[in-house]
């Protein structure tokens, strides 16, 4: 009675009036579901506990990563960094940085494997490290429990730099104001990093930015508008999947808890639209492919779907 694994296809984006570009690279964004939270806190009532065991899930998570082989991998809810993801992915040529949450809810679960946090991996054969910083997000100058990893990389193919941030904003209804404040703080800190560290002269162009995250916010929330309207020139890559090119997918997470079903768009890949081009986007599985018990399941290890995009650097004018 197990439905078949989903087959997701890359949709190539064809746009008129394309200028030259170079240095294709692939980015993956995924909230992998912390092992401690999935077993101990989330109450996914239609998912058998056996499907949530680490011995089942770890191979499905690694398989999803290795099917797509992203050059840049941004993960949230990582509570098996030191014992699994860092060593396994290092063996496959990835370097990485991890930032645990200061008061991870995983620590409240009996038998936990340490705090969860955000992790950023990059393929060493494609990118060279310039700098990486772990930041704690503030709201009205007060430090919060949410973090980000910000990594500055340089392409080994065309020497272009790119700055990537991975974050996981505060969850749940009622905290819209906090997500908005955390998003604003992240944008402010990114603006400082992109402008000051690697573009000392005012004439030189800023480093292109990518921000991947579980924002825990639907597109109508204030934090989404703050990202769309910031001076950093960001756009959300998954809108390219829609017919009109300006609508987010219907869902990036789909789960059933005792309180009901939750099907919503909370995860995003933001990119600097003046300097990067979206070449292809991995499509979303259909409702039928996801199945009546939704996520996670024996076939898919997280309640969030992975987002995968191919980008290129636009040639400078
Ligand atoms: P969040 O509210 O951001 O959520 C934490 C996790 O819970 C997320 O991974 C989220 O997943 C998941 N989640 C969201 N909705 C539900 C739900 N309905 N049922 C179960 N899980 C859900 O966490 P905070 O960072 O604010 O941390 C909260 C915890 O941290 C507290 O439980 C507390 O124990 C601890 N804490 C302790 C402090 C201390 O002083 N000791 C201080 C602050 C926090 P997703 O993002 O996928 O929705
Ligand atoms: Ca979660």
Image (cartoon, helix red, strand yellow):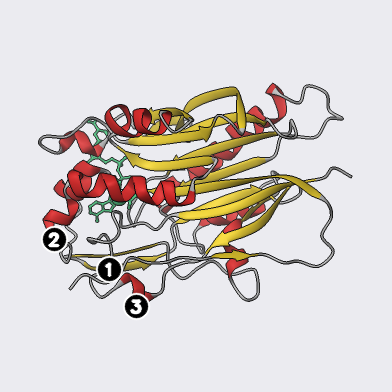
Which element type, helix, strand or loop, lies under badge 1?
A: loop
CB atoms of marks 3 and 2 within 8 Å: no
Disc 1/disc 3 C-alpha distance (Å)? 9 Å
The mark that comes first in sequence, 3 or 2, is 2
The mark that comes first in sequence, 2 or 1, is 2
Reading the image, the residue beneath label 1 is 294
* 61 over 191 or under it: above or below: below
- Name the side, left or right, on which 46 lies relative to 202: left
Reading the image, the residue beneath label 2 is 48
Residue pictured at 17% horizontal, 62% vertical: 47
Say which quarter of the image contains residue 1: bottom left
Q: Which of 129 and 232 is in front in this view?
A: 129
Reading the image, the residue beneath label 3 is 288
- Name the side, left or right, on which 112 lies relative to 78: left
Which element type, helix, strand or loop, lies under badge 2?
A: loop
Other residues around mark 2 within 10 Å, as few (<14) / some (14–19) / many (≥20): few
Q: In which quarter of the image is the C terminus?
A: top right
**Foreground mark, 1 or 3?**
3
């Amino acid at each position: 009675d197990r439905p078949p694994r989903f087959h997701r296809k890359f949709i190539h984006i064809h746009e008129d009036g394309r200028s030259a570009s170079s240095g294709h690279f692939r980015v993956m964004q995924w909230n992998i579901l912390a092992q401690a939270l999935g077993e101990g806190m989330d109450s996914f009532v239609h998912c058998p506990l056996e499907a949530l065991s680490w011995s089942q899930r770890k191979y499905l998570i690694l398989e999803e990563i290795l099917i797509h082989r992203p050059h840049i991998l941004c993960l949230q809810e990582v509570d098996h960094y030191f014992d699994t993801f860092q060593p396994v992915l290092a063996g496959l040529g990835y370097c990485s940085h991890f930032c645990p949450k200061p008061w991870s809810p995983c620590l409240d679960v009996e038998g936990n494997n340490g705090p969860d946090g955000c992790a950023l991996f990059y393929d060493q054969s494609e990118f060279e490290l310039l700098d990486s910083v772990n930041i704690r997000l503030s709201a009205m100058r007060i430090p919060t429990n949410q973090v980000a990893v910000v990594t500055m990389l340089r392409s080994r193919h065309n020497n272009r730099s790119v700055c990537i941030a991975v974050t996981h904003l505060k969850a749940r209804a009622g905290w819209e104001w906090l997500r908005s404040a955390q998003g604003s703080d992240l944008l402010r800190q990114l603006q400082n990093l992109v402008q000051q560290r690697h573009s000392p002269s005012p004439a030189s162009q800023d480093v292109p930015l990518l921000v991947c995250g579980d924002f825990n916010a639907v597109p109508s929330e204030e934090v989404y508008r703050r990202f769309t309207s910031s001076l950093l020139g960001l756009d959300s890559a998954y809108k390219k999947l829609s017919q009109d090119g300006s609508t987010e997918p219907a869902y990036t997470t789909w789960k059933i808890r005792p309180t009901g079903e939750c099907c919503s768009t909370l995860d995003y890949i933001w990119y600097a639209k003046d300097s990067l081009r979206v070449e292809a986007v991995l499509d979303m599985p259909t409702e039928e492919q996801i199945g009546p018990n939704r996520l996670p399941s024996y076939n898919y290890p997280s309640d969030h779907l992975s987002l995968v995009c191919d980008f290129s650097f636009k040639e400078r004018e």
